Amino acid sequence: MKNDDVIEVFRLQTPVWEFKYGDLLGHFKIMHDAIGFRNTLTGKNYTMEWYELFQLGNCTFPHLRPEMDAPFWCNQGAACFFEGIDDIHWKENGTLVLVATISGNTFNKMAKWVKQDNETGIYYETWTVQASPGKGAETWFESFDCSKFVLRTYEKLAELGAEFKKIETNYTRIFLYSGEPTYLGNETSIFGPTGNKTLALAIKRFYYPFKPQLSTKEFLLSLLQIFDSVIIHRQFYLFYNFEYWFLPMKFPFVKITYEEIPLPNRHRTFTGL
């Protein structure tokens, strides 16, 4: 953008898989977040969102391929920036609201930061893992998803001097609850030639019920197997930052929340916006 352009910043939110299921997941507050921009001088709109590059299911659970010893992960994530804002997509079942106005100069600084962020955080992580649902509970693992990217971007804009409007902003978080995790190793140490074959088999057996493209009968059977592993035997194998961890699961095991996280305050060291 030109340095003196005036850019409007929009909060965008819509139910996950809205393109396929409409507002269905919106009823459970499972939402996808993005950011929109409008250049008030040129009239052009832009959308920026952080995607799981191979869809949410593939990022959350691996594929088990007969010809491969280790689970095959498609868990890459990246920020995508493109011209246009699909107003109907965001407005019909979600949110499209102005949250700030910035200069072209600020936008350009943000864009440079986005590229750096994109090259640093390359994987998508669905789960936030905590010791319990209570406030101040130990967080074992943080999620790394679309909403976290939006929050990082808002914080960067505030650092650059952006002044956000005082509106309520909520975000979806998916929690797992467990005791202290146990580090198991990486792909090579577990599934390699000198790996732990017993542990490798246990991990693959755990992930097997999560496979895609199931018939109705297979899906119901898989749900029973997942319930047996996670709830009855209280175990979960987490793949995080290219490493495997064992989670000793605790009640309430899994929870989806839609929490308010306020827009950041402007950092007063910056002026001229």
Image (tube, grey):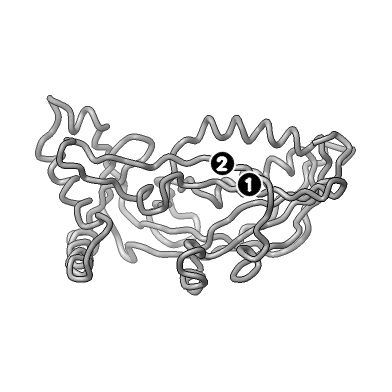
Q: Which residue is mark 1?
A: 48
Quadrant location of the N terminus in the rendered image? top right
Q: Nearer the viewer, residue 1 or 272?
A: 1
Secondary element type, mark 2: strand
Q: Tell me whether the residue at label 2 lies in contact with that at label 1, contact meaning CB atoms closer than 8 angstroms.
A: yes
Quadrant housing residue 195: top left
Vertical relation: 205 (above or below) 77: below
Q: Earlier in the sequence, mark 2 or mark 1?
A: 1
User: Could you give the CA–CA distance between mark 2 and mark 1, rounded to whole angstroms?
Assistant: 7 Å
Q: Position of residue 58 (x, y in %)?
A: 35, 49
Q: Position of residue 137 (x, y in %)?
A: 44, 54
Q: Nearer the viewer, residue 269 or 6?
A: 6
Quadrant housing residue 85: bottom right
Vertical relation: 21 (above or below) 196: below
| Residue under the image location 48 percent in, 58 percent down | 173
Mark drawn on residue 15: none
Q: Nearer the viewer, residue 124 or 243?
A: 124
Q: Position of residue 229 (x, y in %)?
A: 19, 59
**In the visual, does 3 lie left or right of 80?**
right
Q: Which residue is mark 2?
A: 79
**In the visual, does 169 lie left or right of 218?**
right
| Residue under the image location 71 percent in, 36 percent down | 110
**In the visual, does 210 lie left or right of 160?**
left
